């Protein structure tokens, strides 16, 4: 089942980030469909969060997508090299987002390896937001895409599915976010969620 608008439009971005663990992120570009299970996320709590691109109500051409209704892709370029994929949440005007930090390849891993320039699947191949987006062919030019519907066979798109994968609360760690030291006390907030269940290459 594709996650509906009601999943993304809730007010608690931290809860959404936690519940995205175990969901399946799917992309289709140039007729190639690839998918991966999400095993690490980070929540960004809008205008009150010093680590957020929207802190203090900041709005730029790049971040304007964060202010839309939940269920859209916010993809930005980091260090001029890496596209980082985020899920916009909450309702229009409230710029919440969840960064997808780590994934485990599922379908069409051969195509994912080609994108990554790797000869074979190894542990942690999708560990890191830049690696995750690259494996799925997600580029910063895809920012603004809707995640709410599955595209036709000849259309490009990104969406997230609930395939009934259950991750117990005890298997999910709540941790400080990475690389946001500039955010002061907000850097220590336990807004990063990770499970080690899907880091290995063996089948889930």
Image: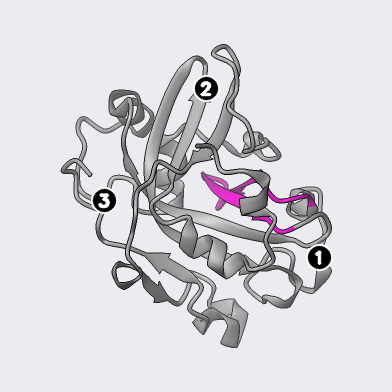
Q: Is residue 203 above or below residue 20?
A: above
Determine if residue 56 is in view: yes
Q: Quadrant of the C terminus?
A: top left
Magenta-drawn segment = 68-90
The spot of residue 31 in percent (x, y) is 49, 14
Q: Please, what secondary structure does the residue beneath circle 2 have?
A: strand
Instruction: State the mark number for residue 84.
Output: none
The tally of labels here is 3
Determine if residue 178 is in view: no
- Disc with the residue nearer the chain's start (2 vs 3): 2
Q: Please, what secondary structure does the residue beneath circle 3 have?
A: loop
- Disc with the residue nearer the chain's start (1 vs 2): 2
Q: Is residue 182 above or below residue 100?
A: below
**Mark 1, residue position:** 58
Residue lying at 32% horizontally and 65% vertically, measured from the top left: 168
**Mark 3, residue position:** 124
Q: Please tell me how crowded label 2 is: few (under 14), some (14-19), or many (20+) other residues with Cα within 10 Å.
A: some
The spot of residue 154 in percent (x, y) is 57, 11
111 with respect to 6 (left or right): left
**Mark 2, residue position:** 29
């Amino acid at each position: 089942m594709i996650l509906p608008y009601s999943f993304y439009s809730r007010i608690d971005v931290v809860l959404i980030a936690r519940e995205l663990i175990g969901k399946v992120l799917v992309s289709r570009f140039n007729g190639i469909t690839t998918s991966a299970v999400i095993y690490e996320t980070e929540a960004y709590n809008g205008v009150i969060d010093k680590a957020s691109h929207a802190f203090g109500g900041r709005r730029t051409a790049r971040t304007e997508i964060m202010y839309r209704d939940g269920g859209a892709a916010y993809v930005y370029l980091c260090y001029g090299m890496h596209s980082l994929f985020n899920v916009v949440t909450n309702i229009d005007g409230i710029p919440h987002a969840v960064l997808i930090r780590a994934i485990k390849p599922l379908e069409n891993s051969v195509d994912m390896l080609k994108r990554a320039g790797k000869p074979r699947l190894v542990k942690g191949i999708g560990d890191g937001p830049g690696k995750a987006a690259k494996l799925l062919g997600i580029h910063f030019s895809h920012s603004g895409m809707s995640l709410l519907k599955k595209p036709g066979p000849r259309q490009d798109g990104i969406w997230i599915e609930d395939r009934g994968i259950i991750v117990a609360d005890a298997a999910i760690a709540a941790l400080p976010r990475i690389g946001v030291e500039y955010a002061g006390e907000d850097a220590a907030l336990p807004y990063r969620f990770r499970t080690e269940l899907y880091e290995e290459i063996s089948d889930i």
